[in-house]
Structures are given as structure tokens and as C-alpha cells.
Image (cartoon, helix red, strand yellow):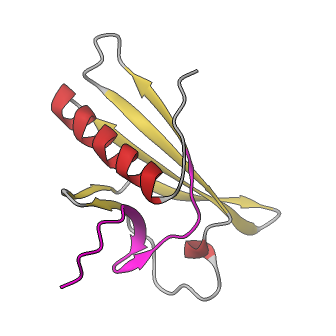
Amino acid sequence: MSKNKEATIQFYEGVSEPVVPEIRLTRGKDGSTGQAFFIFEKPQALSKLSSGEIIGMKMIDEEGELTTKEVKARFVDGSPTFVEAVYSWRNKDDFERFMRFANSYAKSNGLGYSEK
């Protein structure tokens, strides 16, 4: 068994998406509910080399995995150009778990975090 602790995102079982998305968060007034919006520009998942249908997105880290089925492709001039995914949480524990994944993913990909 691999001891790879890198956080990753997958659209296909066992295939990590190398394109790092833009991620934006929204939260309800009390902070317990909200959504994370992922935008992948020209992801490998849409390349001609990828086979199969995207039925969801997995966010995998050392704690396990989070999943969402809210994934759709956006087309520009008839070609799939973007993948958009939405992950929703309904309580503070789910939000804190998502943020732990987001921090692990940022570290794994050399990213920073900023609040606007």
C-alpha cells in the first residue's frame, strides 16, 4: 500500500487531475453551511486521452475522501474547456473537514491561501 500523503483531486478512479483549480468559497451567515466552487481550466479529464464519463469529483487526503456529484463541463466554441464542480457542506464539522482538505491540497500543490 502506498504511503502517499499528497492531497489530490480525481474525476476518474485512481487518476489524479494535474490541473489545479481556482476555488471560491461561500458561507451562510452563521458559517455552518456553504459551498466551494471549483473551476478547472482545460483539465486533463476533458482530454482525448481520458476515457469514460465523469460522474463526480473526489477530494482525497490523508483523512480519507470527500465527494461531490455536482460536476459539469463548460464548452467554448463547441469544445469542452472548463470543468466546474460544487462541494456543499451543511454543518460546521463538514466545513472544518473541507478546510483541512483544502489546506492539504494547497500544501501538496505549492499554493497559498488568501481571503478577499
**Which residue is nearer to you in this view: 75 or 50?**
50
Q: Closest to the observer: 20 or 6?
A: 6
**Is 14 part of what is drawn in magenta?**
yes
| Magenta: main secondary structure | loop
- Which of the 4 image quadrants contains residue 112? top right
Spot occupied by residue 13 in the image (x, y as percentages of width and height): 34, 78
Callout count:
0
User: The N terminus is located in which quarter?
Assistant: bottom left
Asked if the stretch drawn in magenta spans residue 72, the answer is no
Instruction: Name the residue rendered at 75%, 69% in the picture.
Output: 79
* Nearest to the observer: residue 105 or residue 35: 105
**Where residue 111 sits: x, y (%)?**
54, 48
Q: Which residue is painted at 23% across and 41% down in the image?
A: 97
Residue at the outermost top position: 29
Residue extent of the magenta highlight: 1-22
Residue that lies at the very extreme toward the right in this rendered image? 77
How far across and down, in percent of the image, does residue 86 sit?
43, 45
For residue 31, above or below residue 23: above
Which picture quadrant has residue 77?
A: bottom right
Which residue is drawn at the image coordinates 58% and 21% (left, top)? Answer: 116
Spot occupied by residue 40 in the image (x, y as percentages of width and height): 60, 57
Q: Is residue 39 above or below residue 12?
A: above
- Which residue: 55% across, 74% down? 45
